[in-house]
Amino acid sequence: MNPIYLDNAATTALHPEVLETMVEVMKSSFGNPSSTHSFGRSSKVLVENARKNIAKILGAQASEILFTSCGTESNNWVLTSALRDLGVKRVITTKIEHHAVLHTLEVLKTHYDFEIVFLKLDSDGKISLEELEMLLDSEIKTLVSLMHVNNEIGTVLPLQVVANLCVKYKALFHSDTVQSIGKIEFDLSQLNVDFIVGSAHKFHGPKGIGFLYVKKNSGLQPLIFGGEQEKGFRAGTEAVHQIVGMSKALTLASESLEKDQLHISKIKEYAMKQLEDNFNGVVFHGGTDNFYNILNISLPLSKDKTSMLLFVLDMKGIAASRGSACQSGSSRPSHVLEEILDDEMLQLPNLRLSFSSENTTSDIDFLIDVLKNI
Ligand code: PLP
């Protein structure tokens, strides 16, 4: 039985070429990038080349890319420093952000004096731009924190439109782009966003490495103190092999972007068609224009099937999820679905399928066969 992996929004398989590159770095460049001798200098060159490469792919300047341990750290950093150092008194966000944003805001609320405004959402998880604009038309120093692609239902934020509104009303704009980096093209030189976030394990890179894009002269201050790494902005010896691995993964992702998008979109379309043909009344969440690798469904099965659904799939070698991986162990319904679905719909068995370039239509055929027998 070949395992079938349909949980690519949780994490992705390491690309073999990324692994090779990382192993080579670990073998040949163990120097500390802060050391001034040749061992250190050669590691430093690897780190700086990776920074330049990532910046180039994203249309940013190298000095605007700062390495972190993950997407969660990057989100924590922006939110904390915005409230601590940048004079932000109000954060506009939604209740369907990742917990790396929501739980961080909850904690920050106990330390800083600021208001959190949650935008209203429609049943696809979309915000109202009119409501956002109305709120922004204010003197209060504001940070808008809205994710680009929702990790559970794939709803896509119109990044450019929101960025332009933030410029118009002089608000800071942070977007959690963990689900879209490496999956669509970015040109940050044309996008007026102040902070975006990347996490390598979402685009076939290693775990434990991410980055934060910080627009020049933003005033952001460090979250982690210590040495002078990252020009004093993020202390801690750089994870050289991880950084190089992330850079390689982003290069590979950007080189095959069009081909992968096409392939994954076709897999998703095929899955939707098979689900519709076999499950009369299946419901797709996140809107008809949601992100191309995420498919979130409610199945017209009795509600007592909910708890066994993932278990049965797992027994058959199929990995899928019911929402964010960070919450998979929880029996509570997803905070995202709770926000957008009515009680009746929430009772139905729900699945998040998320695809990568490695999936095939026969993966979907097998999934449908298993689902039909539940
Ligand atoms: N933000 C979003 C939208 C995510 O999907 C995730 C991971 O699931 C994170 C943040 C956290 O990223 P990391 O796993 O790198 O901490």
Image: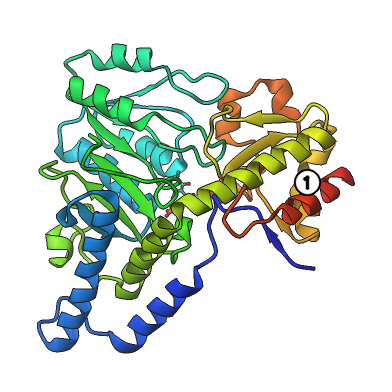
Rendering coords of residue 361 (x, y %): 72, 52
Q: Is residue 352 left or right of residue 344?
A: left
| Horizontal relation, residue 112 to residue 360: left or right | left
Which residue is pictured at 79% across the width and 51% down the height? Answer: 365
> What residue sits 41% from the left and 47% below the top?
178
Name the residue at 83% across, 40% down: 305
Residue extending farthest right = 373
Depicted 129 relative to depicted 335: above or below: above
- Which amino acid type is shown beneath numbered disc 1? Leu
Q: Which residue is mark 1?
A: 309
Quarter holding residue 147: top left
> Residue 366's image quarter?
bottom right
Crowdedness of circle 1 by 10 Å Cα count: few (<14), some, many (20+)? some
| Relative height, residue 97 to residue 243 (above, below) | above
Residue 141 seen anywhere in this rendered image of the structure: no
Q: Position of residue 227 (x, y in %)?
A: 15, 67
Residue 117 in sight in this render = yes
